[in-house]
Image: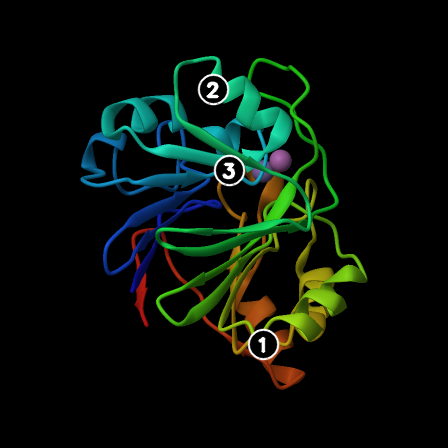
Amino acid sequence: MKIIFHGHSCLELQLKEHTLLIDPFITGNPSAKISKDDIKKCDYIILTHGHGDHYGDTDFLAKKFGATVLATFELAVSVSKKGIKTHELNLGGGFNFPFGRMKLTLAHHSSSTPDGNYAGDPAGVILNVDDKTIYHAGDTSLFDGMKIIGDTHKIDYAFIPIGDNYTMGVDDAVKAAEFLKADIVVPIHYNTFDLIKADAEQFKRKTESIGKKCLILKPGESIEC
Ligand code: NI
Ligand code: MN
């Protein structure tokens, strides 16, 4: 599989047969190196929550590719009213999709649609795809439930926010890396805007000082795994 980081919290997962986008915030994302028209395939869009910097180009891409949007119940219902295919889940629930298994985890944050309507709870995501386990934390504070996530899933790659202000900052994210016990931790949700400036190299040093591996991806860079 190839995992491409498009900046902020947006990941493109090119699996053997399917392409998934997580939090497709491309238009208006100052760190994105592509435009929404550069996405060539999209079978599923996974939304951690409804905020605009995660919802992004969901409507455009879902309609262009006939993609199915996977999200918590209330957000999925609001997306489905636009004539977009959806699959609703809720926290702690997983489902075996044609691409693999996806489960929603807790995330401590808030959620509303880009136009300000109630969008249920925010979530993190655990994916079991192409023999790898990927965790995308969404927007969240540090919480002790991350220990449970780490104890119950053998995570290969954990994508966690470090930008502070709206989510964990560097020090809390280092603690999260300890809890999650992931093979490799990748920082996201930082340096997109002035409010979430963070030093990824400092995060890497601190993570490595507790014996964890950290990989910094610049927007546009990818992992082959
Ligand atoms: Ni948010
Ligand atoms: Mn956010």
Q: Residues within 10 Å of mark 1 (few under 14, many from 20)?
A: some
Q: Position of residue 62 (x, y in %)?
A: 33, 28
> Where does label 3 land, which residue?
47
- Do the CB atoms of the residues marked 3 and 2 lie less than 8 Å apart? no
Distance between the alpha carbons at the discs numbered 1 and 3: 30 Å
On screen, residue 9 above or below 177 = above
Horizontal and vertical percent position of residue 80:
47, 19
Residue 167 is marked as none
Badge 2 crowding class, 10 Å Cα cut-off, few under 14, some 14 to 19, many 20 or more, is: some
Residue at screen point 43% across, 33% down: 69
Q: Secondary structure at mark 2?
A: helix
Give the camera-side residue of 196 and 56.
56
State the residue position of label 2.
80
Q: Choose mark 1 or mark 3, whichever is in front.
A: 3
Q: Quadrant of residue 34?
A: top left
Relative to 92, 48 lies left or right: left
Secondary structure of residue under mark 3: loop
Residue at 39% over, 15% down: 83
Pick the quarter of the image with the C terminus: bottom left
Position of the N terminus, as image quadrant, is bottom left
